[in-house]
């Protein structure tokens, strides 16, 4: 575009948790292009999704008016009618069943300000702590694990620091596809001389350049990490000064990991014992070794144990509290970190302040001027289960699509249909919105102001570039109007004024304001207006005081292959699509490249089943059945198969297992048993 033809608005990408800064190019109130800007997370880079996926903003499928279900069909309605119906159903539900019949699912896709108002609405207006969001499905085990061992569940270091790491250990993350700009920086670090260890079930792109690649069986992370620690202790490679000065519990750790012999672990994990030893020596031998992990570690019935084991490994080698090291969970969606920070969790008010703490409750009751519920609420998985039992009557879902993203979709559909009143607020008529009683049309990221917090705790501005289509409104406006209608009104003049309230009640955000964010981005903790923000955590002391070794033992996944279902299915993302495909599914270029679901299988599996590359196949588990297309590849080995979960045709989560991690309630999306047959 010629520069005089377009205006530019600097904003933050709405896809993954990297948080790339970009300029939206606008002509005649339409976004017509995207250019990267030199943001702190992306240094002028954008991946294919960020660079080319903006057509969804102008897509004709965008919701433009509220919809109300009448005679079984969703029909167009005005805002006043939609709000009026919500008010009537709210009063009737409250009178008949009380506050525990309400629940809300917030969104990792909308701004901090909107998530803050959402959890406030559920607590103040609905009168319950039944509020959660999709962090429960991705990093609940990180929050539970790292909060226990370090005192904070956040990524410890900054993305750019990895360029100066000596060793990078990537595990449970296909980084070049799921967080592409971080993947590019890992490649750059590799060229700078960093050593690379990769532990992944598939031969991902990063494996090709790794110094050690461990092609690990899904669900066996704890065995691997414990055995690495066994080698480190056996060979005296631990950081004794760090352990003595800054940690507690090493004796208990030693007792557990000394039982985890590398040869036995190698058999469990399906890796070579000598490679496992090499990985341990490489990691322990570095001055600055950084761990990067994602859902390959967290989405297990033993997800919290996996996170704790990684934390133990970093503590053992003194790889915390310093630059270019750390334990770095890569958040999946653009604002999953922020949605957690501002209180969209059933036990936590903004800033991870516990509803079970009477001093916290007093503080928020004073700030918000109402009596608040003090019983921790239900998690996503519990909300769905209780809805299925008819106990959750009124459910409000903002910007999430559990009909594709949650495990065991047949169960989810049954549960959502069981609610008496379902409100869905979104930008498209998603698979979930199709089941709603009221659908509220929301503005996209390009049509509103606010902030996102990326995976490295960096709070960045989202800026309005164009008007929303039709009568669509920003989520924060919709929430404010619902709260006003339900009698608990407070008028916010704009998103900046909501951030002022967040800063007042959230210690980590105490020094963050839109005025400051005009000039800089800020990484929390940023407790005061003169605080510069925090590049890496736990510098002189851990958030909890001393770093805690929390020994954990390996346990097998809840469901393993057997005679009826002999293949192990693991799920994940691909480069060209995002989450439940509501946005990337409306990008012609991306859909031309990857239009449908597929299942990757090894040549061995294909041969056994007489399946050729491109054949249509049926895949079944104990929970459901789908059809998909076979991709035969040596990226994957043995009886392990892989499916992306993005696609509604052949939705992988029809098959997945909702078995839960007992500490974090995260479902085991990464391992279930399936059978496959050629169609
Ligand atoms: Fe957007 Fe993530 Fe790609 Fe950056 S890496 S452009 S944040 S999808």
Image (cartoon, grey):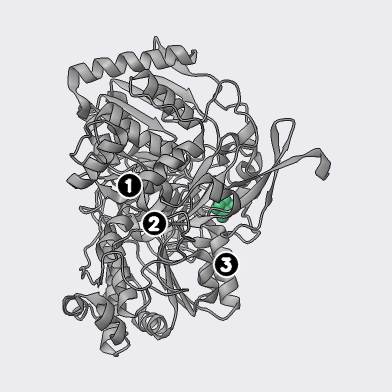
Q: CA distance from mark 2 to mark 1?
A: 11 Å
In percent of width and height, residue 146 lies at: 30, 62
Left or right of 1? Residue 259 is: left
SS assignment at label 3: helix
The furthest residue to the top: 71
Which image quadrant is residue 199 in? Answer: bottom left
Residue where numbered disc 3 is placed: 185
Q: Nearer the viewer, mark 2 or mark 1?
A: 1
Residue where numbered disc 2 is placed: 295
Q: CA distance from mark 3 to mark 2?
A: 20 Å
Sequence-wise, which precedes: disc 3 or disc 1? 1
The C terminus lies in which quarter of the figure?
A: top left
Q: Are marks 2 and 1 in contact (CB under 8 Å)?
A: no
SS assignment at label 1: helix
Q: Is residue 196 above or below residue 564?
A: below
Q: What residue is rendered at 58% in x and 53% in y?
A: 20
Residue where numbered disc 1 is placed: 136
Q: As rendered, which of 388 and 291 lies closer to the eye?
A: 291
Q: As rendered, which of 390 and 356 lies closer to the eye?
A: 356
In percent of width and height, residue 29 lies at: 70, 31
Q: Nearer the viewer, mark 3 or mark 2?
A: 3
């Amino acid at each position: 575009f010629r520069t005089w033809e377009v205006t530019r608005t600097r904003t933050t990408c709405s896809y993954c948790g990297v948080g790339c800064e970009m300029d939206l190019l606008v002509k005649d109130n339409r976004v017509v292009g995207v250019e990267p800007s030199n943001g702190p997370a992306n240094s002028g880079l954008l991946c294919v999704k960020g660079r080319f996926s903006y057509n969804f903003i102008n897509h004709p499928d965008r919701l433009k008016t509220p919809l109300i279900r009448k005679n079984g069909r969703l029909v167009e309605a005005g805002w006043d009618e939609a709000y009026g119906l919500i008010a009537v159903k709210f009063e009737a539900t409250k009178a008949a069943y009380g506050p525990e019949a309400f629940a809300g699912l917030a969104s990792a896709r909308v701004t901090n300000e909107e998530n803050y108002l959402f959890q406030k609405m559920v607590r103040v207006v609905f009168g319950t702590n039944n509020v959660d969001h999709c962090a429960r499905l991705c990093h609940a085990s990180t929050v539970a694990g790292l909060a226990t061992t370090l005192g904070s569940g956040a990524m410890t270091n900054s993305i750019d620091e990895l360029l100066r790491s000596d060793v990078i250990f990537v595990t449970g993350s296909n980084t070049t596809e799921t967080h592409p700009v971080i993947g590019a920086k890992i490649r750059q670090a590799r060229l700078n001389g960093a050593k690379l260890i990769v532990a992944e079930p598939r031969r991902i792109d990063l494996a090709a350049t790794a110094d050690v690649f461990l092609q690990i069986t899904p669900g066996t992370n704890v065995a691997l990490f414990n055995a690495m620690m066994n080698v480190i202790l056996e060979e005296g490679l631990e950081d004794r000064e760090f352990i003595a000065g800054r940690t507690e519990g090493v004796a208990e750790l030693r007792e557990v990991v000394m039982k985890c012999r590398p040869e036995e672990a190698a058999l469990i994990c399906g890796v070579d014992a000598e490679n496992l030893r090499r990985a341990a020596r490489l990691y322990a031998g570095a001055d600055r070794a950084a761990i990067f992990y994602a859902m390959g570690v967290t989405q297990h019935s033993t997800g919290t144990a996996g996170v704790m084991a990684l934390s133990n490994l970093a503590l053992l080698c003194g790889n915390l509290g310093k630059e270019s090291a750390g334990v770095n969970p890569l958040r999946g969606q653009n604002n999953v970190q922020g949605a957690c920070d501002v209180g969209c969790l059933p036990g936590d008010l903004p800033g991870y302040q516990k509803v079970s703490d009477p001093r916290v409750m007093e503080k928020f009751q004073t700030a918000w001027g109402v009596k608040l519920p003090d019983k921790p609420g239900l998690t996503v998985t519990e909300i769905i289960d209780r809805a299925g039992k008819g106990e959750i009557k009124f459910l409000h879902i903002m910007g999430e699509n559990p009909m594709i993203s949650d495990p065991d979709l047949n169960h989810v559909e049954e549960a959502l249909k069981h609610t008496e009143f379902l409100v869905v607020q979104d930008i498209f008529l998603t698979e979930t919105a199709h089941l709603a009683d009221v659908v509220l049309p929301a503005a996209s990221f390009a049509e509103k102001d606010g902030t996102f917090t990326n995976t490295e705790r960096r709070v960045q501005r989202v800026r309005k570039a164009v008007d929303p289509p039709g009568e669509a409104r920003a989520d924060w406006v919709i929430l404010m109007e619902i709260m006003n209608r339900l009698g608990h009104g407070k008028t916010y003049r704009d998103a900046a004024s909501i951030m002022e309230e967040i800063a007042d009640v959230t210690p980590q955000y105490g020094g963050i304001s839109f005025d400051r964010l005009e000039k800089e981005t800020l990484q929390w903790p940023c407790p005061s207006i003169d605080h510069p923000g925090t590049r890496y955590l736990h510098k002189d002391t851990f958030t909890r005081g001393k770093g805690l070794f929390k020994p954990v033992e390996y346990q097998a996944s809840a469901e393993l292959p057997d005679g009826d279902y002999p293949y192990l299915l693991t799920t994940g993302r691909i480069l060209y699509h995002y989450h439940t495909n509501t946005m990337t599914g409306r990008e012609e270029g991306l859909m031309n490249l990857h239009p449908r679901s597929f299942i990757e299988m090894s040549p061995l599996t294909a041969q056994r089943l007489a399946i050729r590359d491109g054949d249509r196949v049926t895949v079944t588990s104990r929970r459901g059945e789908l059809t998909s297309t076979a991709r035969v590849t040596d990226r994957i080995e043995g009886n392990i198969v892989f499916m992306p979960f993005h696609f509604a045709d052949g939705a992988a989560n029809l098959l997945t297992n909702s078995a839960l991690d007992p500490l974090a309630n995260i479902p085991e999306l990464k391992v279930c048993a399936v059978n496959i047959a050629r169609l």
